[in-house]
Each structure stands twice: as C-alpha cells, then as structure tokens.
Amino acid sequence: MIEREQIEMDVVFVGAGPANLAAALHLKNSIAEHDELVERGVRHGNKVGEIEIAIVEKGPYVGAHILSGAVMDPIAIRELMPDFLEQGCPVDTVVTDDAFWYLTKNRAINPPLVPPPLKNKGKYIISLSKMCEWLAGKCEEAGINIFPEFPASEVLYDDNERVIGIRTGDKGIDKEGKPKGNFELGVDLLAKVTVLGEGSRGSLAKQLVTRLGLNEGKDDQVYSLGVKELWEVPADTFPEGKVVHTLGFPSDTKTYGGGWIYGLKNNMISIGYVTGLDYLDPLIDPHAEFQKFKTHPKIAEVLRGGKMLRYGAKTINTGGYYTMPRLYADGVLLVGDCASFLNGQRIKGIHTAIKSGMLAAETIIDAFEHGDFTSRTLRHFEEKVDHSWIYDELYPVRNFHASFQSGRWSALINSGLQFLTGGMAWGFMPKEHHIPGHERMQHIDDRHGNTDRTRYAELKFDKEMIFDKITDVYHAGVAHNEDQPSHLHVLDTEICATRCAEEYGNPCQRFCPAAVYEMEFNETRKRPELKVNFSNCVHCKTCDIADPYQIINWVTPEGGGGPDYKGM
Ligand SMILES: Cc1cc2nc3c(=O)[nH]c(=O)nc-3n(C[C@H](O)[C@H](O)[C@H](O)COP(=O)(O)OP(=O)(O)OC[C@H]3O[C@@H](n4cnc5c(N)ncnc54)[C@H](O)[C@@H]3O)c2cc1C
C-alpha cells in the first residue's frame, strides 16, 4: 500500500483569491508586529513566533481561475497595505464617470442621477486576476508557501469532528479511474487552523457547511451567474474610466439581471451580464441573455468595429447577510465569497473578501496566542465581522436580493425605501425570502406563460459581436487533461433522460455557460441521453447550483485544469 504523505503546517488556506491572499499576508505581517510589541513590553500577552503558512490553489498559477468585473472599492486594500499603489498594485484605471442605463427593447433611459450603490467615482477598475498574481508575489516575499496546481479535494476531521487540515487531489488517474505512469497520491496538509476561501460555491465549503450544520437557522444561499467578455473597441468609442451599469433588457421582469461596461486603458472594455440563477423559466440561458444584451442598439454601438479577446463565466453568491453560514467551527474559518461576504446591491465582493480575510487573520493570531484553535477562540471571528464596516455595509441591504424574488418592480420600490430609511424599511420584511434557485425553477409550461420559447429567436451568432458557447469557451483558454475521470458527478443520469427531459427540458444544456452538458440521441436506447463534455468546464459551479434535482456534484479536477483567466 502506498503511504500518503502528511505535511504539518500551522495554517492552511484553501484558494488563492483576494480573501485568502489578504488573510495570509495580514497574518504574517501582524504576527511580526504583535511579537515586536510583546517583546518591547508595549503589548501584554504571548509571542506567537514563526508559523508555517500554506496556500493551496487549484489553478496552474495564482490568478488563472480568478474572474471578476472588476471595479474595486479600495477601502480594504488600503487597510491591508496603505501604500498599495506605491508597492505596484496593478490597478488599470480610476473611475472618472458613472452612468446607469435602464434599457427597454430599443431605448436606453439615462436618468441624471446614478443610484447611490452604483456610484463608483474614485474607485479602481482592475483585473482581479492580475491583482491576485501581484498579491501572491507579496505573500511569497513574506515567506508564505503557495502551492498552485494543488486542489483541496477533502476536508480532514478528527474523531471529534474537529477540522485538522485538507487532502489534496490525486494526480495521474485515467478516465477509467486507474493510475497512470505519472500517478501521484494527494498529500494531507495538516493544520491547526484551516481557512476556506474558495469563492462562490466552494466545493469543500459545501461539504463542511452541510456536515457541521453551519447553515442552521440561516437562509439558503442564492446565486447569480456573471458572463463576461473582454473587448478591444475602436478609439473614442468608450472612455477609459467610465463605468456603466444597466437594468432591464434583456431580462424579463421576473428575472434578476443587469449588465455592465467598464472602460479600461488602451481602448479595452470589460463587458458582461449577470443573471440570477433563481429564474423561473427553465428555458432561460444566461450566456444567451448576455449575447442578447449585446444586440441592444446602445450596447451594440459600443462594440461595433471592435474585437472580442477573452471570455469567462463565474457564479456570484448574491444572498448577503442572511445567507451567511456560521463562519467558524473547531479548527476552521470561512472567508470571502464562500462565506457570503459579497454585497449584492453593489455587485462588489473584493473589498469585503479582503476585509474578511484580515479579520480571520486577527482571529488566528488570538488563537495562537492562547494556544486554542477550537470554536471557543475562533468564534470571535464573527464578533469581529459584526463590529466592522462589513456589518455596516451588508446589514442594511440584507433583503436586497430577496426582494428581487418578487419581481423587478417590487425590488425597485424596496430599494428606494431602503435608501430613504437607511435600511430600516426592510426590517419589516420576513427574512425567509431567499428561496434557492433550484426550488424556484418551474416546469416547462406553455399554458401559464412561464415558458417563453421565443426568447432567443432573433439571436444570430455572427461570431463578430454575438458568439456561441463553443467560440466563447475557446476564448476562456480552458484546458483539462481528457484522460481523467469527469469532475462533474451526475448522480443519476436516468433522471436526465426521463423526468428532467419532460419536466424542465434538460436545463443544464442552457444554464451551463460552457456547453458542458449535451443531450445526445442514443440509437440503442432510442432516446436522448446526457453527455458531459467536462473538458469545457470553466469552474463557474452553475451546474452544482442550478440543477433542479440537485444531482450534479462539482468536485475539483486534477490540479492545473480549468480556464486561463490571465489578465481578465
Ligand atoms: C462576473 C463577476 C463580476 C464581478 N464584479 C465585481 C466587481 O466589479 N467588484 C467587486 O468588488 N466584486 C466583483 N465580483 C465579486 C468578486 O470577484 C468576489 O467577491 C471575489 O473575487 C471573492 O474573492 P474570494 O477570495 O472569496 O474568491 P475568488 O476570487 O473566487 O477566489 C477563490 C480562489 O480559490 C480557488 N479554489 C476554489 N476551490 C479550491 C479548492 N478546493 N482547492 C484549491 N483552490 C480552490 C479558485 O481557483 C480561486 O483562485 C464579481 C464577480 C463575478 C463572478
């Protein structure tokens, strides 16, 4: 029997996104500061000393799997590193102009006032992928170990359900599940504290929250899918530093959705569309919604004569404060998107991810100082969050997404009330409003107006402005070794061929933005059956979330596989 290697660390961070990179760096810097103050007698307490910190990342390099808009509120990075600009943080440009367009089918209504949550002047337009690469460099300079191509595949527990680390995925297994010549067993990384910062719908966070019941008494999480392209447009078409957010076309009024255009340097723009994955009509296709968005005259005017360079798609956890799980258990903390720190109203989570990581780091220092890594000490993380500006920002907008579940007009009225009363008006709304998308999706039903078969009838994939999924996936630089077991576990394919086909028309073919799921006619069985093109997967996790029967389980593939979002 091959022995599995065990490596002892002090703290292991799962995922090299902004939350964990900030956490690890803040931890390292704050320990040095803390110990110096204790040494000088300025602070009472114990020194922490040198600790071993590791960050594991499933992508081939830090940033490869990072996809965002992205306008960053600098409040948190400034706290982490007050001289972040002088230290070379790769911000693209400063926001100098904001606009909000309400789109009807053919017109754009441009109200003179931009809704306050969408005001971004003075914030930074960035490539989050580039920023994470830069932050990873800072972490390495500080002596933090970063292991790219190391997906964490399992949480490790002791006999008392205390988290004691993670197991990384095995390498070199063929599609039949047999070891190949390059087979390598994953390692067990043991740690006193494990921090999950896996981003939206983290695969370990999902296991942990369920196993330890961390979402008891909380609302179910709700998600959206953001589909993005990076374009080069003709000079003077869209100014650098301009930020546009849209509402309306092409989403119907029952569906949560909106678009963005951000003007970067060198005539580049980030353009994208967000669709709530709690839509009702199973015929909705978030990728097609984005393509349709680009056909609007006001949007097409920006893109005409330009060239699409890159593509990506990723889910966003939109539920907010009420959907935040318990953030700690013995030996473990949850930070960033996988712990619901995103502000859905502002569509911003970078700053809250960074701040959550910093507060987690401060909690970990307390734990080392007292030599206690159980919930007794780690629960202080939640108190720190509730006493920080994260609470002040997230609590007043706690019902933002829930109100969209009653339709766009109710949401707009509620948003207005919320603004006028500083968040008080929503205190009267029942909080059980967050219904997960897979429960909301309705059966195909042409009689009651739930199903719109004409939704994309006019969409022409001209491959100049409007792209099909396969062309877009090519621009996401996706690569997976095809000789490995599929990382998309469909637990009962019989349902796909029978009930799902009849009830929902196999919505996986539409909700997946990367053409992973296909119903293919099986000549022997004389019926369409599910084919999973796992190598197209962009790791957005939509299938794990949106499948109405909850029979798709996304697990980490072999390390290094996935999209390449360099510079996105
Ligand atoms: C389309 C889109 C547009 C957005 N626009 C904005 C915006 O304009 N402004 C803003 O502030 N926010 C925006 N956000 C939200 C913002 O990107 C997130 O809130 C933020 O990235 C969350 O950071 P995180 O560290 O929690 O997770 P992530 O950034 O998702 O990083 C998680 C990392 O963990 C890795 N990982 C996951 N699981 C494992 C595992 N098991 N093992 C090893 N590694 C793993 C991933 O590969 C990834 O590198 C947007 C999000 C999307 C999807």
Image (cartoon, rainbow, N blue to C red):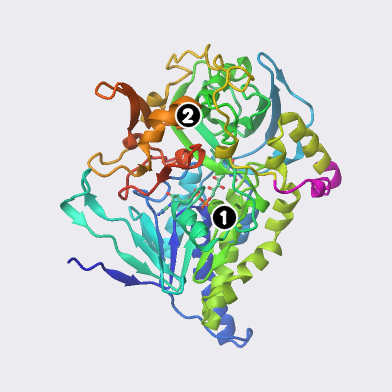
Residue 412 is situated, as x and y percent measured from the top left of the image, at 76, 33
Look at 53% across and 64% down and name the residue there: 333
Residue assigned mark 1: 339
Q: Which mark is residue 507?
A: 2
Mark-to-mark CA distance, 2 and 1:
27 Å
Which residue is farthest bottom?
41
Dividing the picture into quadrants, the one containing residue 76 is: bottom right
Residue type (three-letter) at the residue carrying disc 2: Pro
Residue 258 is situated, as x and y percent measured from the top left of the image, at 63, 30
Is 512 rendered above or below residue 436?
above
Residue 394 is situated, as x and y percent measured from the top left of the image, at 70, 52
Q: Is residue 249 left or right of residue 489?
A: right
| Residue 420 within the segment the image draws in magenta | yes
Is 205 rendered above or below residue 284?
below
Which mark is in front, 2 or 1? 2
What SS does tag 2 mark? Answer: loop
| Residue 493 can be seen in this image | yes
Read off the magenta span.
Answer: 419-432
